[in-house]
Image (cartoon, rainbow, N blue to C red):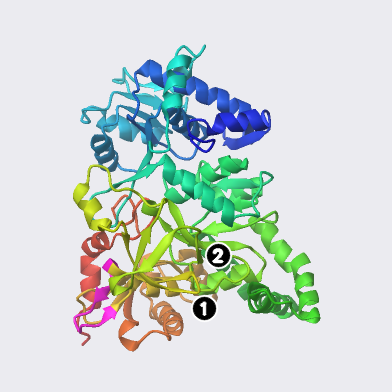
Amino acid sequence: MGNHHFAVLVHKQADKYENREALRYRDYDVNQWKSVTWREVSNTVHLAANALVTLGVKEEENIGIFSQNKPECLYADFAGHANRAVSIPLYATSSAAQAQYIIDDAQIRFLFVGEQYQYDTAFSVLGICPSLEKLILFDRKIQKHERDTTSIYFDEFLQMGEGLPHAAVVAERTGRASMDDLANILYTSGTTGEPKGVLLHHSTYEEIIRIHDIRLTEMTDKDVSMSFLPLTHVFERAWTYYCLHKGVVVCLNLKPAEIASTIKEVRPTLMCSVPRFWEKVYAGVNEKIASEKGIKKSLMLDAIRVGKTHNLDYVRLGKRPPLMLHLKYKFYEKTIYALLKKTIGIENGNFFPVAGAAVPDEICEFVHAVGINMIVGYGLTESCATVSCFVNPGFEIGSVGTIMPDVQVKIGENDEILLRGKTITKGYYKKAEATAEAIDKEGWFHTGDAGYIKDNQLFLTERIKDLFKTSNGKYVSPQALETKLSVDRYIDQIAIIADQRKFVSALIIPQYDLLKAFADENGISYASLEELLQHPRIISMMKERIDTLQQQFAHYEQVKRFTLLPEPFSMARGELTNTLKIKRSALNKNYAEVIDKMYEEKK
């Protein structure tokens, strides 16, 4: 067992950094960010590890953590690792049925819960999950149910470890810890079928840390990372472990909806995100440019043009920009780019990893043009996140970056991307058949993603299982269309419909505020949102924008009809996964009448 093993990681770091800041979180009671030192983290993990023994947690037992991002999530996590237990995170937005499935499948006895929603959801299944014995509540403000006689608050849990009554037991277990131990089971939310528990061992994380040390040489213990995505998501979880390994300050964002304000309070140097975050930034900038006139508008447009030429045509390729271009870029760097970064809250930025979905080329070009170091990457839960990521200079727009050191990638049948190596899962929890289907006899994991490799850079083309076949026998990639069209500032969410249909159509959640503003500016009157969304001038305007964006697609791939919906897609209605991916089967069911109407013959 090395220093990377999570049974000892925080304690080794506490010995190194002592009273230096390790974590930061927003205390909403006093509306302030509070710091936690490495020594405090270590001491709390020692208490929690002893408390787990008091509860009766055994080695290799599964413990659950059902919460938004909080310091307590990490305390419980590392306390579990110290006891050679396996921590299983549940998405904070999980429904009772989703929570019940994971609790039953993993036979969880002890479940840590974050806030009132998670408590209410967990308590509702307490009596029907045979294994579940006790809930441990992170938030003291949680109102316990009158029938609840077993749950305890986290401070009461820590009191069970005071004086470290089981220090010898914990030390023995930590001493037996090995890289072959299972660290986490991460349940994929899945767009089809029941969730699968992905097995991630300590050896997997050890290798992820090693290869990131090789790749991310610009990252140091002076960095500050905003933990924005759920710690349940492999991207954020593996990244947070890596940040702790590097001695980076991890700032835990409790409320995802408030990221626009919390990022300005923290002003991080690092932050993992999905493309949607940057799409909103791009849309906001375009909206700002559209509202400007005269010299100010000209300067903003010129700044983006200069940035693209400077950073993409020269710096990206390792070339030296011409002097006049460079001087102009430096001027914009100190003015327009600096103002943009400060407005977002990333003026201290080092780099910003992005993954989880395809990044539209326009977004990637814009972000790099204004001097933001976005590192686009590709990975899956089964690959413990990163398979490839941008390397600067030399990255290609449209790629998902250079393949990580010692990760084996090859292209199989139907252009499927196959993976092999120490970062790849050993399989799915209690699902031998699914494991055998995903990992072939030569050890190659079949991703289900199609793509190609050029100059050691990986390019994605489509999700093989998601390819639609029209009734005319033509194949359509919905992700490619959705990625292209989602950059439009009037489109918030979009779902392509085409499978076994005569032509391609789309369900669109528009940016309601922008549509209303358009209506006001153009004298369009309406009595309700529904009436506005069906107004001929709105439909005409949206069709014109869609047609402009989809010109590069073959005629049979283009959206012929679309419907603007008055309500966003919803997790509550089963239309989105916990990672906000579209569940096409649910959309097809929930909007069956709307979809059928788009395919009615026009009279």
Q: Is residue 397 left or right of residue 142?
A: right
Find residue 538 and report its image quarter.
bottom left
Position in image of residue 514 (x %, y %): 51, 68
Q: Position of residue 165 (x, y in %)?
A: 46, 11
Q: Nearer the viewer, mark 1 or mark 2?
A: 2
Q: Position of residue 443 (x, y in %)?
A: 31, 56
Q: Amino acid at mark 2?
A: Phe
Residue at 41% of width from left, 50% of height from top? 422
Q: Is residue 508 visible?
A: no
Q: Is residue 53 visible?
A: yes
Name the one closer to the observer, 172 or 437: 172
Above or below 578: residue 115 = above
Q: Which residue is mark 1?
A: 522
Q: Is residue 290 magenta?
A: no
CA–CA distance between discs 1 and 2? 43 Å
Kind of residue indicated by mark 1 = Asn
Q: Quadrant of the C terminus?
A: bottom left
